[in-house]
Image (spheres, rainbow, N blue to C red):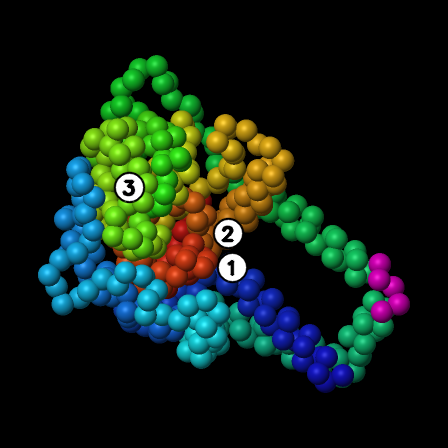
Amino acid sequence: MLFRNCAIYTMLLSFSTQVVLAAYPPIGNTAAGPSNAAETFAQPSSDDFQDIRDVIEMYSEVCLTNNAPQAITGSTSATAPTDANSHAPSGLRKYCDPRFMLSLLDPRDTILPFTGKKAAFWLTLASLVAGLVVLEQYYPYSGYIAEGIRYNNTILLSILYGMEPLMIAFFLIAAQYPAANPIPNQTSGDIEAQISGSQTEDTALVIPCHNSQEKIVKTLEAALKHFRPEQIYIVDNGNTTAPTDQTQKIVKNIHPNINYIWLPIGNKNIAQFTGSMAAKNYKNILTTDDDVALPTNFKAPLQLFNDNVKAATFAIEAIDTKGKKPIFVGWQDIEYKFSDLSKLVESRFGGVMYPHGASSFWDRETFIEVLRRHDTVYYAEDVKLGLVLQKTGKRMAM
C-alpha cells in the first residue's frame, strides 16, 4: 500500500511539475554565464566545442567565398576536430554518462531564482500532496479506485481514449490563430518591394544543408522572393574535407551572390552558428532546413519581438516534392498540426517551449548566445534550443 501510494504521489508531482514548467518556463540565473549552462546539462562535450567555436568565429569571413569552397582552418592553437562529437561519448554511452544522469536530477534550474510565483506554486503543491496523504489515511480512496478499475476497465478505457480528444479540444479553444498574411502581388517583379513587404531587410537566411543538390533549388527559388541573394547563407556541412555533391555549383548557378560556406564538420547547430557569425551585418536570423520552401505571403514576425521575446517559431505544413499530400505525407502533416496547436497554446501561456526543428526566427545576438551554450548533439537539438533560450531569460513566441 505504501509503495503504491508513493508511486501515485510521485506521478502527481511529476505531472504537476511538467504543467507548471509548460506554463512558466524556468528562467536560469543570467548572471551565471555560459559555464553554468554547460554544467546544467553536464554534457562532457560543451567545453570541448569551445575551441571549434573560437575557430569558426575567427575564420567566419575566410570561409565565405563566391568561388571555391573553403574549410574553416587557420594557424591557431585551437584545432578543429574532424568530427564534432569526437571528444564526447557517443550513442548509448553518452546518455549513460554519470554526469549527464546526475544533471537530469539537478533541481537548480527549476527552483532558482526563487520567486514569489514559484514559492506559491511549491507551497500549493506541497499542501495538495499533504492533503491527499491525510485523506488517504482516513478514507483510502486510492484502494477504491484501483478496485473499481480492476473489475471495470470501462473507466480506464474512457480515460485513455477520452484524454487526447479533450486535450485537442482545449488546444482548439485556447490557441489563438493569427490572421493570415495577405498574398502579395507577384506581377510587379520588384524584389525591393517584396523584401519590404516581407519585413526581411535586416534578416539573414541561414540554411544548413548536406548533400542537398536535389532539394536546394526549390528552397532557394522560394527564398529569393523574400531575400536578396547576399542575405542568404548556405552552410554545406559534412565530415569530409570537401563537398560530396554539386550543391555549391547549383547554388551559384541560381545566383552568384548567394553566400556559400563549406563546413568540414557534419553538425547542424555548428552550421547554424557558422552562418550566424558570418551574417554579422544583420540584426535577425531566419534558419530553415534545406527542404523548407517559404510561402509567398511569408512575413518576418517582428511584431512578436520585445525586450523579453527574442525568438519565434512558425506553423509548418508537410507536402511532397510536387506540392501534394499523399497518405503518408498527410499523416506527417497531421502530426505537424497537433504540434502547431500545442505551440500556439504555449505561446499564449508563458512562451513556446521549443521551436520546430525545420524553421525558426531569432534575434541574431540571442541565437549566437544560445548556440554557444548548446551541446551541439543532434539528438533533440530543437528541444535544446528552447531549453537553452529559457536559461538566458528570454522567451519564444508564435
Residue occupying the far left of the picture: 75
Q: Nearer the viewer, residue 83 or 173?
A: 83
Residue at point 44% right, 49% down? 357
Q: Which residue is mark 3?
A: 234
The reply to whether the magenta stretch includes residue 74 is no
The image's mark for residue 22 is 1
Q: Does residue 211 show up? A: yes
Q: Nearer the viewer, residue 279 or 45?
A: 45
The reply, left or right, for residue 58 in relation to residue 121 is: left
The amino acid sitting under disc 1 is: Ala
Q: Which residue is mark 2?
A: 346
The answer to whether the residue labelled 2 contacts the one labelled 1, judged by CB atoms less than 8 Å apart, is yes
Name the secondary structure under disc 2: helix
The numbered mark, 2 or 1, whose residue comes first in the sequence reads 1
Q: CA distance from mark 1 to mark 3?
A: 34 Å
The reply, left or right, for residue 324 in relation to residue 201 is: right
The amino acid sitting under disc 2 is: Glu
CA neighbours of label 1 inside 10 A, class few (<14), some (14 to 19), many (20+): some
CA neighbours of label 2 inside 10 A, class few (<14), some (14 to 19), many (20+): many
What range of the chain is rendered magenta?
150-154
Q: Nearer the viewer, mark 2 or mark 3?
A: 3
Look at the image and tell me in which quarter the C terminus lies: top left
